[in-house]
Amino acid sequence: MKSLELFLERTILASRWLLVVFYIGLGVALAVYAVSFVSKLAKVASNVFLLDDANMILAMLALIDSALVASLIVMVMIASYENFVSRFDEGESDISWLGKLNAGSLKIKVASSIVAISSIHLLQVFMNAQQYDNGKLMWLTIIHLVFVVSALLLGYLENMMSKAK
């Protein structure tokens, strides 16, 4: 019976390596998103003298939004790999710039990134408010506020849990 238990435990622990497929997939998605970013950047650059101030700001916000999404992907890939699969070898890769993220702080950073992305999207919508009806503006604002409240609650809960430890 003990050998069966040991086999099951080793199988469950080994299954964490299946997560690597997802992280590699996120890396591929990041590369595809980089191509999309370069395309957006080229479009903005080619129209730099044609865009008025408001449209240039909207274009810059779209580029900032892309950078935030890309950063979120990198943060999730690296922190999740370290938390759930294996630690990076300190000598081979210096990821001290990322900081040590546990599952709780990763959730907070992801939530904060989502709030930032939502804020930029909402700002873009408000800059083109004439294209949206009041109902849609209201729902977009409510959704954004739900993201903000969720991030605040996650931060509060993480703070409570860290004090309990």
Image (cartoon, grey):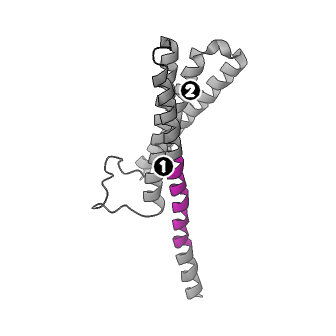
Q: Quadrant of the N terminus?
A: bottom right
Closer to the camera in the image, 40 or 23: 40
Count of numbered labels shown in the rendering = 2
The amino acid at mark 1 is Val
| Residue 19, quarter of the rendered image | bottom right
Q: Is residue 83 above or below residue 105?
A: below
Query: Where does residue 122 sit, x and y in percent of width and height?
Result: 57, 23
The prevailing secondary structure element of the residues shown in magenta is helix
Label 1 packing within 10 angstroms: few (<14), some (14-19), many (20+): some
Residue 32 location (% of width, % of height): 53, 45
Seen at 61% across and 31% down, the residue is 146
The residue identified by callout 2 is 121
Rendered position, 87 above or below 129:
below
Q: Are marks 1 and 2 in contact (CB under 8 Å)?
A: no
Image coordinates for residue 98, horizontal then vertical, percent? 36, 47
Q: Residue at x 30, y 61 (%)?
A: 92
Indicate the amino acid at tag 2.
His
Q: Is residue 152 visible?
A: no
Which residue does the image show at 65% across and 12% down from the upper left?
130
Q: Is residue 17 magenta?
A: yes
Identify the residue under disc 1.
76
| Magenta-colored stretch includes residue 134 | no
Position of 59 relative to 100 (above/below): above
Asked whether residue 133 is in view, the answer is yes
Quarter where residue 129 is shown: top right
Q: Which residues are magenta?
A: 12-30
Left or right: 130 with respect to 3?
right
Mark 1–mark 2 Cα distance, whole angstroms, equals: 21 Å
